[in-house]
Image (tube, rainbow, N blue to C red):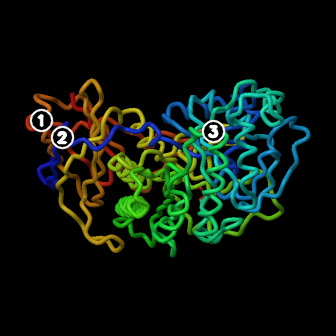
């Protein structure tokens, strides 16, 4: 163990329980955008394609990633989407302009194919309805088509289209980012709140057991942030279960220190939305609690996308938003995952945006290979090893000064305790200039040892995985472990998983 490493410390005590680990924390998102659907999950001519044209290599990676739910079909796309275009015989499905991404939508894939893909992937589908260009009637029609057993025009249409059993979709988003000026059919909080309320009430008449998500803010820096949630929830409090949060982060102007601490903003975002929701609940004298669905989060080099020209000539499935992630991105990403877990008492669902090709952990070549981006690994490890209960760990570490967030601790961490008593610590070292020697006080667990430790790091913080070098950045066994006291060396700019048992 290095003698020059800075000291850090955390405490594991089963009494420091936050909440159960929510499987839905490990949701992702498939939008009709770029190559996410076409040549992402679906590519009939691909060597690995199954009988329905789904890429088996992507299905395998989706399972390995440990995805729980998948949100569909947008995103900005949903605000101009007509779901009817995507059902029934394929040769009669219309091609349409997709205004959100300046592309042509062929409608080769629609809700029935998406649900069939979800069954194969072993994930729960989560639908969004169009409250941009459409309204209550179309949302209720889609719900009836999907979830009503049979005996009505729409449910019999689904049966005729090959889906005898109802799709039984539980979680529904009432529109997408309706606070954003870029959204087709963008609305004020009052306009949206009223529409969301009426849509939710009608949807609950069809199926009272749905779980409904009202749109919150598209980011904590939106000018209407806070006021938006308050007004929308005043209209919808009794009829929704969740309010959404969306957040994307990128390294700006070479400021790596701030970037690695971007979970500070996510933490602020979550606390503010919880406070706002609870304030509305108190005003309404309601005992009901609204949870957060953090249904878009990721690293996204949005400024590069904004600087680029939109596609010309309305292409079909053009390469869009194909960010290639490096080690530092994966470490910042791991910090966001830790924050989601730390807030599992109120963040009870989340969707990494997105799954394949579009700001995604999985990349594909059309007709060719599929590989894991650096961000694949923290997600897959957290999904695999976080189970049972989330524990606070009271981290203590040196801090550093950032331009965006002021003083931030170098160590960011959380732990989970499985039913068999095994504890897993997830920890990020944000320091760019040295390792942290992490001492773990696990006396409350009685005589445990480190049974395994991995680290995701690289001598080059900008190292990436490519189709030719797909495992350049991957978790490796961490040899720097001591048992008395428990101590693990966390390299600079690293994501770490430590098992105690
Ligand atoms: O995930 C990419 C886009 O980001 C989504 O379509 C939109 O909801 C958000 O602005």
- How many discs appear? 3
- Label 3: state its secondary structure: loop
Question: Which sits in the foreground, 476 or 452?
Answer: 452
Question: Which sits in the foreground, 25 or 472?
Answer: 25
Q: Is residue 237 above or below residue 191?
A: above
Residue 444's disc is 1
Q: Earlier in the sequence, mark 2 or mark 1?
A: 2
- Badge 3 residue CB within 8 Å of ligand 1: no
Residue 63 visible here: yes
Residue 207's disc is 3
Which percent across, then down, holds residue 1? 15, 43
Q: Are dots 1 and 3 in contact, CB under 8 Å?
A: no
Q: In this view, does 270 lie above or below 126?
A: below
Quadrant containing ligand 1: bottom right
Question: Which sits in the foreground, 323 or 67?
Answer: 67
Residue at image location 51% in from the left, 48% down from the top: 352
Residue at image location 30% in from the left, 30% down from the top: 418
Residue at image location 47% in from the left, 45% down from the top: 349
Question: Which residue lies under the disc numbered 2?
Answer: 12
- Label 2: state its secondary structure: loop
Q: How far apart are marks 2 and 3 (CA)?
A: 43 Å
Which percent across, then down, holds residue 40? 67, 42
Which percent across, then down, holds residue 11? 16, 44
Which percent across, then down, holds residue 184? 71, 65
Q: Crowding near pointer 3: few (<14 within 10 Å), some, many (20+)?
A: some
Q: Which of marks 2 and 3 is in front?
A: 3
Q: Distance between the residues labelled 1 and 3?
A: 46 Å
Q: Earlier in the sequence, mark 1 or mark 3?
A: 3
Q: Are dots 2 and 3 in contact, CB under 8 Å?
A: no
Residue found at the very far right of the displayed protein:
92
Residue at image location 53% in from the left, 45% down from the top: 361
- Label 1: state its secondary structure: helix
């Amino acid at each position: 163990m290095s003698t020059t490493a800075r000291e850090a410390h955390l405490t594991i005590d089963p009494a420091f329980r936050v909440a159960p680990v929510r499987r839905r924390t490990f949701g992702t998102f498939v939008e009709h955008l770029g190559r996410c659907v076409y040549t992402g999950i679906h590519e009939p001519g691909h060597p690995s394609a199954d009988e329905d044209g789904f890429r088996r290599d992507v299905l395998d990676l989706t399972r390995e990633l440990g995805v729980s739910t998948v949100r569909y079909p947008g995103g900005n796309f949903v605000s101009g989407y007509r779901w009817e275009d995507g059902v029934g015989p394929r040769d009669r499905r219309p091609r349409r302009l997709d205004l959100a991404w300046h592309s042509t939508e062929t409608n080769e894939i629609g809700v029935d194919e998406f649900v069939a893909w979800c069954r194969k992937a072993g994930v729960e589908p989560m639908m969004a309805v169009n409250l941009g260009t459409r309204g209550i009637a179309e949302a209720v029609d889609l719900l009836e088509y999907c979830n009503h057993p049979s005996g009505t025009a729409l449910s019999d249409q689904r049966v005729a289209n090959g889906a005898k059993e109802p799709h039984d979709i539980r979680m529904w988003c009432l529109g997408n980012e309706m606070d954003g000026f870029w959204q087709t059919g963008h609305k004020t909080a009052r306009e949206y709140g009223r529409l969301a309320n009426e849509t939710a009430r009608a949807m609950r008449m069809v199926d009272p057991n749905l779980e409904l998500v009202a749109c919150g803010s598209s980011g904590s820096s939106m000018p209407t942030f806070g006021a938006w949630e308050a007004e929308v929830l005043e209209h919808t409090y009794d009829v929704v279960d969740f309010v959404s949060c969306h957040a994307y982060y990128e390294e700006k102007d070479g400021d790596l220190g701030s970037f690695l601490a971007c979970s500070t903003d996510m933490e602020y975002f979550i606390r503010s939305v919880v406070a706002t929701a609870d304030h509305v609940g108190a005003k309404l004298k309601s005992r009901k609690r609204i949870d957060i669905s953090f249904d878009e989060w990721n690293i996204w080099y949005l400024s590069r996308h904004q600087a680029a020209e939109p596609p010309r000539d309305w292409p079909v499935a053009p390469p869009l938003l194909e960010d290639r992630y490096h080690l530092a991105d994966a470490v910042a990403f791991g910090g966001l995952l830790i924050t989601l877990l730390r807030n599992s008492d109120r963040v009870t669902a989340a969707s990494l945006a997105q799954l394949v090709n579009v700001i995604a952990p999985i990349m594909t070549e059309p007709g060719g290979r599929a590989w894991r981006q650096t961000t694949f690994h923290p997600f897959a490890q957290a999904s695999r090893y976080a189970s049972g209960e989330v524990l606070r760990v009271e981290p203590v570490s040196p801090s550093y000064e950032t331009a965006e967030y002021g003083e931030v601790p170098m160590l960011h961490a959380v732990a989970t305790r499985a039913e068999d008593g095994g504890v897993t610590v997830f920890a990020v070292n944000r320091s760019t200039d040295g390792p942290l020697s992490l001492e773990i006080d696990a006396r409350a667990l009685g005589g445990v040892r480190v049974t395994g430790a991995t680290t995701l790091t690289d001598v080059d913080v900008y190292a990436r995985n490519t189709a030719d070098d797909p495992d350049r950045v991957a978790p490796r066994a961490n040899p720097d472990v001591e048992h008395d006291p428990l101590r693990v060396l966390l390299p600079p700019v690293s994501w770490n998983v430590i098992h105690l048992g």
